[in-house]
Every structure is written in structure tokens, then in C-alpha cells.
Amino acid sequence: MFGPGITTVFASRWKALWWAGGILLTAYCSVPSADETAKGGAEQSQDVKAAHDAINALDQLNDPPHED
């Protein structure tokens, strides 16, 4: 579907090694480090509060209160 066909990738050992190396490099670059995922509690709670505030602001813009 995407990229080279399976018969052309594994036509030789060298092509298979390059393909496998590309897959491993993609996986290595895609996974975040432990430092990035272990944010401090205060910093993470600030991010959550900012997200909630943004959602509330959008809700107010999309559905303003009706005055009777």
C-alpha cells in the first residue's frame, strides 16, 4: 500500500537491513523521553486548568446565555 512492495524490500539482505533500520529509527524518534512525560504536578495541573478555561470560553462563545 505505502512504500516499496514486500518482494522488493526483501529481495536482498541489505535492503531488508535498511528497511528494518528505518523502522527502528522511526520508533526511536517517535517515543518521548521519560523527562518529557514526567512533568511536575504543578506544571501539569496548570496545563489542565488552562485547557478547561479554554473549553469554557469556547462554550460561552458558542452558546451565549439567553436573557429573558
Image (cartoon, grey):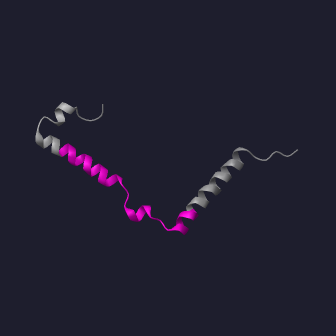
- Picture layout, residue 15 above or below residue 39: above
**Residue in view at x 11 percent, y 38 percent:** 12
Q: Position of residue 33 (x, y in %)?
A: 37, 61
The answer to if 45 sits in the magenta stretch is yes
Give the quarter of the image for residue 66: top right
The answer to if 33 sits in the magenta stretch is yes
Q: Position of residue 18 (x, y in %)?
A: 18, 45
**Residue in view at x 21 percent, y 33 percent:** 6
- Picture layout, residue 17 above or below residue 6: below
Residue found at the far right of this picture: 68
Which part of the image, by quadrant, shows the C terminus? top right
**Residue in view at x 16 percent, y 41 percent:** 16
- Chain part drawn in magenta: 18-46
Taking the image as shown, residue 53 lies to the left or right of residue 20, namely right
Which part of the image, by quadrant, shows the N terminus? top left
Give the main secondary structure, helix, strand or loop, of the magenta stretch. Answer: helix
Taking the image as shown, residue 26 lies to the left or right of residue 16, namely right
Q: Position of residue 38 (x, y in %)?
A: 44, 64
Taking the image as shown, residue 6 lies to the left or right of residue 44, namely left
Total marks shown come to: 0
Residue nearer the viewer, 32 or 59: 32
**Residue in view at x 58 percent, y 64 percent:** 46
- Picture layout, residue 63 above or below residue 53: above
- Picture layout, residue 25 above or below residue 7: below
Give the quarter of the image for residue 52: bottom right
